[in-house]
Amino acid sequence: MMSSKAFLQFSQGKCSTYTRQFQNYLRSSKCHRKQWTLEHISSVSTWSPFAAAFNTRPQRKLSLNLKLEKTGLFGIHELRDPTGFFLLKQGVEERVFRLLEEASSSTRNRKMVMVFDELSDTLCKVADMADFVRVAHQNKDVAQAAEETCVELASLVEQLNTNVALHQALQTVLTEGDKFPTDSVDQRVAELFMFDFQQSGIHLEDEKRKEFVKLNGNIHLLGTFFQRGSQKPVSIPKNKLPENLRHVFGVDGDNIMVSGLFSDHYSSMVREAAYRIFLSHDAHQADILKTLLTARYRLAKLVGFDTYSHRANKGTIINSPENIVEFLNLLSQELKPRAKIDFEDMLRLKQQEESTAKEIMPWDPPYLTAIGRQKRSTMSNMNSLPYFSLGCVMEGLNNLLQCLFAVSLQHVEMELGEAWNDDIYKLAVVHQTEGVLGYIYCDFFERYGKPNQDCHFTIQGGRRRDDGSYQHPVVVLQLSLPAARGSNIPTLLTPGNVDNLFHEFGHAMHSMLGRTRYQHVTGTRCSTDFAEVPSVLMEFFAAEPRVISTFARHYKTGEPMKKSDVKNLCDAKKIFAASDMQQQVFFSMLDQVYHGAHPLSGSTSDLLAQIQSQYCNIEYVPGTEWELRFGHLVGYGAKYYAYLVSRAVAAQVWHTCFKADPFNRFDIFPLFLSVKVSLFYVALHVFINMVISE
Ligand SMILES: [Zn+2]
């Protein structure tokens, strides 16, 4: 998962620039691959300082020196106090004003795209940071000041996106050429800025632009309502539920409240009851969804697209809804027989608990997948925990990154006031020859009020400054790991936690290694269907026995995990992959149809039933309306398939570059470029073979 990677439309970018630059960057480095094997692991009595730092909770720094000036959040001196947000916002407004003047000035003395990128950077640096602080900071005053800054900067961005003079200045440069020499990177980034303008309807005549702004506002509101409604619990009278099931759900007077799907519950009766009740018809929510989809369709038509999906996917790797549907259909055909085997295996598992069970129902797979994994792995999650202390996993990750990219993670002491909580770690990412590439703040532990969602936030994007120096990227990785228990037991990770840690580090390394000239296209600010490639690629490493066995060792005794246990644990991660992916294909297809031509050929639930029977081995349950809980329709809107494309590309990269040797320092990025050309014919088939063979 990533944060809202771009700040509104102002900083949405694409990835092509980044890949080219990365390619050059890797080639210019003169580092040689370092072999790193089990023999290099020191014994447990001598944890490396790096591992030891992560196996002890960070200590609050106490200062006895009253004169010692503390710094502000992220080392920004204005943020020593919540009112600093106001100062920062004012600074942004002043700088933006000067940049607007520069863009329209006849005496401008640098490229137009440089002015635009600085404009975008000025806004993003404060807005993205404030967006993070408003959700992460526990102090209400700070969180509120950050929230206000977000709202005010959002309105400033809105004004800029519809600033006719600014648009005209860029348009002139694009059609007539800049007065300074430009290359293909400048040209591409300038086009992306223009693309963002057009997404805001700036090129429309007055009447249409007004309608655009109105529709946009409605879509935003409807999206918020829909998301809120998608999480709303359902209340039913007690007597509608068998007595033996009532205690599982919340009781509210004479009613039972069902707040979710209970998909991990061991009783299939509980899972079924929750499924049928939580997904029951809700006329109001259905109206909101229908109105939202219609408004999106009208907005797309207004700016000259056939459907909302055409608009949303312009400029992505896959490029058009027709290609998306082709991709999903191919994937679906290949997955069907494999998913069928998965469901047969699941049924056998179900029958071990209920001998009369005859089929797999939609409420079964998550529970049975967990059971299947448990059985495949020779070790229970509980027994494997001591082998994955946070310190040893971080050390393993660090060694892997040294092998792959010649970068190391170095623990950095923070200054007083720099972090938003006591338990944050700061890492410098240091390249063997290039030095510091950027900083990662690790906000790893659960705490009251912290969103329970793993996420990568860009705080500051990397970019080449006018004086030739490089602005370091700064990111936050947020996880929800349990804190260390006492001073003797470090934080211990489940196999799922290890996957998530690797995934989020994939995003962080994408941000660190991008080294783009412009921040508008840096790191995760790339095309949505490319954004998850580095993170999903890292998940392949987390499921590879040769990688896991370099670091899985008992935190007390230092004893390495047995090779056979490591292998079984990795195999367990891969079971039921086809059935799981089939469900993702189904969701992606539903998202495409809803964002296709309107009016829709039936109600949203009619379409769901139709698509489910076409794409899934599990039958639709009449009377349920799963789509009303599909909150991702708002955030992804016609791009839910993007994760599958990222997975396909990552699978190709893994198989081509790392399957034979996961510690291979491979120049992988030219491959990313070729993938775009041959996506269907190479990536898809390699990907499917991988699913089938593993
Ligand atoms: Zn992600």
Image (spheres, rainbow, N blue to C red):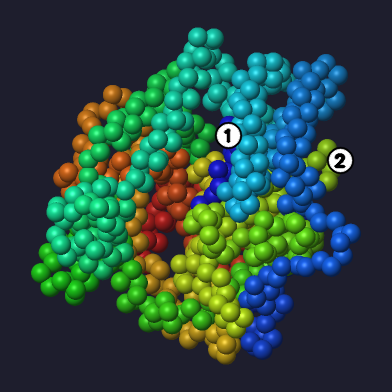
Q: Amino acid at mark 2?
A: Asp
Observer-side mark, 1 or 2, equals 1
SS type, badge 2 = loop
- Residue 364 appears in the rendering: no
What residue sits right under mark 1 in the picture? 8
Q: Where is residue 200 shown, x and y percent of the image?
A: 55, 23
Which residue position is annotated with label 2? 467
Q: Earlier in the sequence, mark 1 or mark 2?
A: 1
Which residue is at the front of the view, 156 or 681?
156
Taking the spot 70% from the left edge, 71% from the top edge, the residue there is: 59
Residue situated in front as seen by the camera: 301 or 9: 9
Going by the image, does 617 lie left or right of 299?
A: left
Residue at the limit of the structure toward the front, as seen here = 253
Q: Is residue 78 left or right of residue 200?
A: right
Count of picture labels = 2
- Three-letter code for the amino acid on which mark 1 is drawn: Leu
Residue 577 place in picture, x, y as percent: 35, 61
Task: Tell me the quarter of the picture where residue 157 sits.
Answer: top right
